[in-house]
Amino acid sequence: MTALIFRGQETLVGIPADSRGFAYGDGVFETMRVDRGRVHWWDAHWTRLATSAERLGLQVPDYGFAREACGSLFADNSDGVLKLLVTRGGEGRGYAPQPNAPPVWMVSRHDLPARTQCGLALHWSQTMIAIQPALAGVKHCNRLEQVIARGECARRGTDEALMCDGDGHVICATAANVFVLLDGRWRTPRVDRSGVAGVCRAHLLPVMEASEECLSPADVEGADAIFLCNAVRGILPVARLGARSWHDLSASIEAARRLAQLHPGLVLDLEHP
Amino acid sequence: MTALIFRGQETLVGIPADSRGFAYGDGVFETMRVDRGRVHWWDAHWTRLATSAERLGLQVPDYGFAREACGSLFADNSDGVLKLLVTRGGEGRGYAPQPNAPPVWMVSRHDLPARTQCGLALHWSQTMIAIQPALAGVKHCNRLEQVIARGECARRGTDEALMCDGDGHVICATAANVFVLLDGRWRTPRVDRSGVAGVCRAHLLPVMEASEECLSPADVEGADAIFLCNAVRGILPVARLGARSWHDLSASIEAARRLAQLHPGLVLDLEHP
């Protein structure tokens, strides 16, 4: 990775030792797909960042300055992943936030993940995702639940894990939202008590005429099709969830075709079975 | 603050840009009181750190090396606060933990907080603390809930906030455990679904013959006495909680006397009313 670190508009040589991001995960982030130097969904990512920051009462960097810093990482017009991470500024120990401290923030460049060549294998996570309306929807930096759940995948030999909240409602995968086709209609879990309001999810909701609902594990296992999605990898059709298999991935592949019309980089390489 | 940062036993010049602590709050920490260069409860803090790290599947630094690094920060035998923060090592983007990556960790020295001169004023936090058994008890670095709740205190003019979980059970203050005297017996909330298993709390449980219980806000408001506690500040008697006042703080002051017998640094300066 290549990274630039700032406090406000001041360049830092590294992450400060008194960083509230390091101490408390006191920040928010965006992970953006870059195609030929361009972030196709930049406006949506910036809007979510600003909304998330406002919910947590933390300041965002100056828009023009941040955009320029991001652009400088992809001045070679290549493909990749751009991450923008904004943490609350302020010195000293203790949870109390300091008003008006300039944010400590970082932009970094990463390689694109490998394209998916077949449908994903999932399992039901043993780790529930906590119900917390104060943080729901926000792409914040408190991600221990996702780290623990993702760690299960290596042991289970799966690609991703589906997580339920404490009431047993299906919420998301560790790093993706989930859509299921039930009774001819695409549905995705509500994210007002847990989970992240994904940028790809937000773009898909209207074009898929999808609804936000409470979904049970039985709803998901009974679905005619299921896919994961995020703003870097687009739509990822699911072929297996525990003992349940989906052999016909055509509905998810069709959804991916519609997504590719919205975002030219998010083309699915998966061959039609 | 003065800080030393390491990857395993290698000294780093700063927190690495790819730190999982910075990205995800993927770590645990201990905040220790130092009196004349000595951490009286070192063993208890180290044991909790190791237990917390094991629960999250992350590696701790070598014991002797870490103890020496901590000692070097207080070689002048002064008083202060020692913080030991251990994050999961590993490179790259994404939640998946990398097995066997040496931890990135930091020890830092801070000033002691001012001694409390009177009973604390609390309010009931508007921010609930999420129910998450996978993280309960652990002093991990995902602290956004506490940051948000602590931010309420400045607006409300209080010293601390009491937090309830999603089921309405009282759990803790933002940076302290809570004990209440009910029917002649000290009680403290269970921390098996939310909250931190505090080191001071653990020392107090047997000497106060206290019990771990489910407590409601009505239990707390109906208590004959209430105090907060943590390993840096010891016992903090509470004088006010919203509209409820406690004028006689003698039971909490008596508890503080017993604590001072366990830990010579944790003497209460509060005068007997």
Image (cartoon, coloured by chain):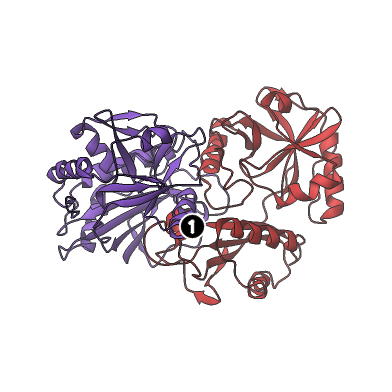
Chain colours: A red, B purple
The C terminus of chain A lies in which quarter of the figure?
top right
Residue nearest the observer in this picture, B93 or B29:
B29
Which residue is nearer to you in this view: A133 or A196? Answer: A133
Percent x, y of residue A65: 64, 75
Residue B114 percent location from the top left of the image: 26, 61
Classify residue A87 as left or right of residue A123. Answer: left
Q: Residue at x 32, y 54 (%)?
A: B84
Q: How many marks?
A: 1
Pinpoint residue B194: horizontal percent, then vertical percent: 44, 37
State the image coordinates of residue A161 (x, y, percent, origin top left).
62, 35
Residue A82 can be seen, yes or no: no
The residue lying toward the viewer, choosing from A209 and B246, is: B246
**Letter of the chain that mark 1 sits on in the rendering:** B
The image quarter in which residue A16 lies = bottom left
Q: Quadrant of residue A78?
A: bottom right
Q: Can I make out residue B250 in this image?
A: yes
Q: Can you identify the residue that label 1 sits on? A: B22
Secondary element type, mark 1: helix
Residue type of the residue flagged with mark 1: Phe
At a point 60% along the width and 60% down the height, the residue shown is A54
- A146 over B8 or under it: above or below: above
